[in-house]
Amino acid sequence: MTKTTIREVQSVKEEAILNIDNSSPQSRELVEKAYKFSDLFGDMLFDEDSITGESRLLEGGYKELPDEIEKFSYYDMVGFEIGELDGDHLGKYDILTRTLTLTENGAKEDFIMLHELIHVHEHLLEDLPNCYMDIALFSLKKELSKTIKNLEEIIFKYNAYFIATDPHNRHFLHSTVFMLKSLDLDLKMGYDLGTVFGYGGFLKNFLIEEYFYVQVQMKKRD
């Protein structure tokens, strides 16, 4: 079996960006839906007024960001389409072709789009130096800790679960940053915790109580 090199993978990604076409009515509708939620992802793009923006503040002003973040555009950098997917999948983001695909049923639910948009932004950061993912992790943990009392326990057991089992290689697809961002979106959207991560289905309650083997504890509001 021939091993794919990093250079070859990058070449595929660059070609995919050049071939993105969001001109069909269905694609444009999905792009518009993505932009509707764009304000929820300011932290993943290191916006100045977001929880990650402080990391850019240096003496004399804000540090410039890499072009991948500074010039990020759903329309120009992500392909959107309605299509069929294998099994019971309702959505998928292909990191090589940079295409976000939703089934017709998946397109009806906001939490499906939000789940896949986390993949889009997570992959963007994974292509950059590790410090960007680290800052996103630290910032999300700090922010969520204000609301979720036992967040450190959840993070530990989330990762320990994959060390012990990892039957479907889920952690490769859903990093700790992904998990934290999904909880952040649940809170902002008023969903039950686990909805965005679990597509609103069987993982919604399973996510916190059984999947991590831990009961979430919310802090009381003042």
Image (spheres, grey):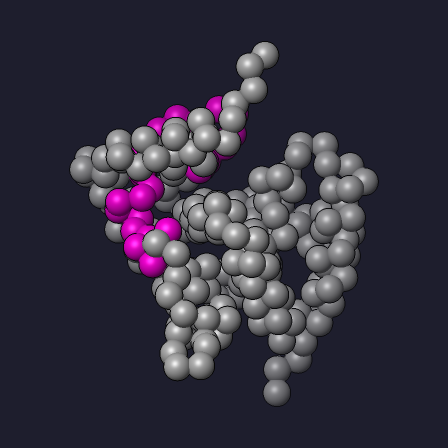
Indicate the position of residue 121 as horizontal and vertical percent values.
45, 51
Along the viewing direction, whichever of 189 and 153 lies nearer the viewer = 153
Residue at screen point 59% across, 12% down = 1
Along the viewing direction, whichever of 198 and 99 lies nearer the viewer = 99
- Residue furthest front in the image: 59
**Quarter containing the C terminus:** bottom right
- Residue furthest right in the image: 164
From the viewer's perspective, tell me whether residue 16 is left or right of residue 29. right
- Residue furthest top in the image: 1
- Residue furthest bottom in the image: 222
Residue at screen point 41% across, 70% down = 63
Counting labels gives 0
Residue at screen point 69% across, 54% down = 208
- The span picked out in magenta is 68-93
Residue 102 visible in the snapshot: no
Q: Is residue 168 magenta?
A: no
Q: Quadrant of residue 49?
A: bottom left
Residue 131 visible in the snapshot: yes
In this view, 128 is above or below 138: above
In this view, 95 is above or below 54: above
Indicate the position of residue 199 as horizontal and vertical percent values.
52, 45
Along the viewing direction, whichever of 104 and 182 lies nearer the viewer = 182
In this view, 103 is above or below 141: above
Indicate the position of residue 146 as horizontal and vertical percent values.
62, 76
Residue at screen point 77% across, 45% down = 161
Indicate the position of residue 139 as horizontal and vertical percent values.
57, 68
From the viewer's perspective, tell me whether residue 142 is left or right of residue 107. right
